[in-house]
């Protein structure tokens, strides 16, 4: 792939970025939750304990540290995200109608701090630097996951549900696969946007691909391949006017073929992915969750509490009975917003997402930032169909999505090498 010309400071070593780069990487590493499994084990109750919650506080502090280095730009980034601000506002208001106000209040504080972390990263770094901050984070995570699987298999390799599948430093294999799929596109984008360190980032991208294969997560592998295809698509799209026309037509034809395959050959696609028609029980969760949504469609049940408030007549109890097993979340980002924040929250998130998609499409024709934004957004979008990865507190994936969305909205031609 042709390297992207960059201004001189794009080739600067990480130290030239000042204190902001290590602060941002440290914050992202904490949000990755890769330290929770070795510290607390893989039980959901342990991961939600008071000590674990307290250990996320340094991430909030580091975020404020990065904010202090670019306060005005951070405010500018926030102002350009009205739908994201509205989403956070709905979350705050949901405390008043939540079925567990104390838990919602605590988690709203966490998600606001998490979201702010994405905004400050977008405000502080141009595209090349942002890609390297994300790449450095995933490089560390990939190396640690490899060590865990090889040197400490009791932590890094699953032994019960999917024996032999690698999980790295996360509770299950899909988490490793999903994180490394996102890591692959961030590392690849860093290689393209920073040619002098391309050898380093391509090497870690290969490691991320290896970890996805070892996780045996077919969905993550498909996501990674689509992200890689999008990276190449952006590279070809930026070659010249004739190539742009050809690639746009190719994209339209590809979308039509994909839609036709989903409509007329869904069973074959599920078989290829190793899934059944219920997506491993996810559709049963969705059906049960939708029946609870029908009872409070406009407000939902409060931010972040549906899956933790237990009792014989709670929404969770009804979902558990109808699904036939105990789900940890909605396994769909859109249903998660609806059941927690109602139509108000779902609408705000939907508008924020549409804005991000529109800006990504524009960037594909105008900005080298598309090398990071387009592959990341497509992988993240695929993950959002089967996982609750949107507007999630203490979550690396949400921080990076917000950072990319905000960076797309910031006018800074000098940063778009």
Image (spheres, helix red, strand yellow):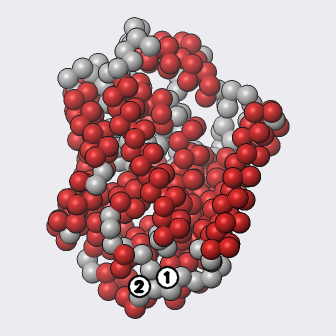
- Most foreground residue, 253 or 46: 253
- In the rendered image, residue 364, in percent from the top left (x then y), is placed at 53, 65
What residue is drawn where x is 50% and y is 86%?
5
Q: Residue at x 52, y 27 (%)?
A: 327
Q: Residue 54: x, y in percent?
A: 25, 47
Residue 406: quadrant of the picture: bottom left
Quick one: 237 or 222, which is closer to the camera? 237
Tell which residue pokes out farthest to the bottom in this image.
Answer: 8
Indicate which disc residue 10 carries. 2
In the current view of this chain or complex, which residue is farthest to the top?
A: 313
Q: Which residue is mark 1?
A: 194
Q: Does the residue at mark 1 contact the one at mark 2 (Cβ under 8 Å)?
A: yes
Say above or below: 374 vs 7: above
- The quadrant the C terminus occupies is bottom left
Q: Position of residue 130 (x, y in %)?
A: 40, 70
Res 310 seen here: no
Counting from the top left corner in percent of width and height, residue 232 is at 66, 69
> Which quadrant, please, contains the N terminus?
bottom right
Disc 2 residue crowd, few under 14, some 14–19, many 20+, Cα 10 Å: many
Callout 2: SS: helix
> Mark 1, residues whose alpha carbon is within 10 Å: few (<14), some, or many (≥20)?
many
> Residue 156 is drawn in which quadrant?
bottom right
Residue under the point 20% across and 59% down: 75
Whichever of labels 1 and 2 marks the residue nearer the N terminus, that label is 2
Residue 241 appears in the picture as rendered: yes
Residue 61, disc:
none
- How many numbered marks, from 0 up? 2
Indicate whether 323 appears above or below 409: above
With 304 as the anchor, is 95 left or right in this view? left
Label 1 element class: loop
Q: Disc 1 and disc 2: Cα gap in Å?
A: 7 Å
Tell me what residue is drawn at x 41 percent, y 88 percent. Answer: 7
């Amino acid at each position: 792939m042709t390297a992207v010309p960059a201004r001189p400071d794009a080739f600067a070593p990480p130290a030239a970025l000042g204190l902001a780069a290590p602060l941002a990487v440290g914050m992202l590493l904490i949000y990755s939750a890769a330290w929770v499994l070795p510290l607390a084990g893989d039980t959901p109750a342990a991961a939600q304990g008071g000590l674990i919650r307290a250990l996320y506080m340094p991430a909030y502090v580091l975020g404020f540290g990065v904010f202090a280095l670019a306060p005005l730009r951070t405010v500018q980034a926030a102002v350009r995200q009205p739908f994201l601000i509205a989403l956070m506002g709905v979350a705050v208001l949901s405390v008043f109608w939540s079925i567990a106000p104390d838990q919602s209040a605590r988690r709203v504080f966490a998600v606001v701090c998490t979201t702010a972390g994405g905004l400050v990263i977008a405000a502080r770094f141009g595209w090349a630097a942002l890609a390297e901050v994300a790449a450095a984070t995933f490089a560390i995570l990939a190396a640690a996951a490899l060590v865990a699987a090889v040197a400490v298999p009791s932590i890094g390799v699953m032994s019960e549900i999917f024996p032999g599948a690698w999980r790295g430093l996360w509770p299950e294999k899909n988490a490793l696969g999903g994180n490394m799929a996102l890591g692959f596109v961030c590392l690849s984008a860093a290689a393209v946007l920073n040619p002098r360190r391309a050898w380093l980032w391509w090497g870690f991208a290969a490691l991320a691909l290896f970890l996805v294969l070892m996780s045996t997560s077919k969905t993550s592998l498909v996501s990674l391949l689509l992200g890689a295809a999008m990276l190449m698509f952006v590279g070809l799209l930026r070659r010249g006017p004739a190539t742009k026309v050809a690639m746009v037509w190719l994209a339209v034809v590809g979308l039509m073929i994909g839609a036709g395959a989903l409509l007329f050959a869904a069973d074959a696609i599920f078989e290829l992915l190793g899934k059944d028609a219920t997506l491993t029980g996810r559709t049963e969760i969705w059906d049960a969750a939708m029946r609870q949504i029908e009872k409070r469609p406009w407000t939902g049940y409060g931010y972040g509490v549906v899956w933790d408030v237990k009792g014989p007549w709670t929404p969770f109890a009804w979902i558990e009975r109808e699904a036939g097993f105990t789900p940890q979340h909605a396994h769909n980002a859109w249903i998660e917003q609806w059941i927690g924040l109602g139509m108000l929250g779902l609408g705000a998130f939907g508008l924020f997402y549409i804005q991000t998609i529109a800006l990504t499409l524009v960037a594909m024709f105008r900005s080298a930032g598309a090398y990071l934004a387009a592959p990341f957004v497509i992988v993240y979008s695929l993950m959002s169909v089967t996982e609750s990865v949107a507007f999630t507190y203490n979550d690396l994936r949400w921080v990076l999505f917000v950072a990319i969305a905000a960076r797309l909205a910031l006018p800074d031609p000098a940063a778009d090498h």
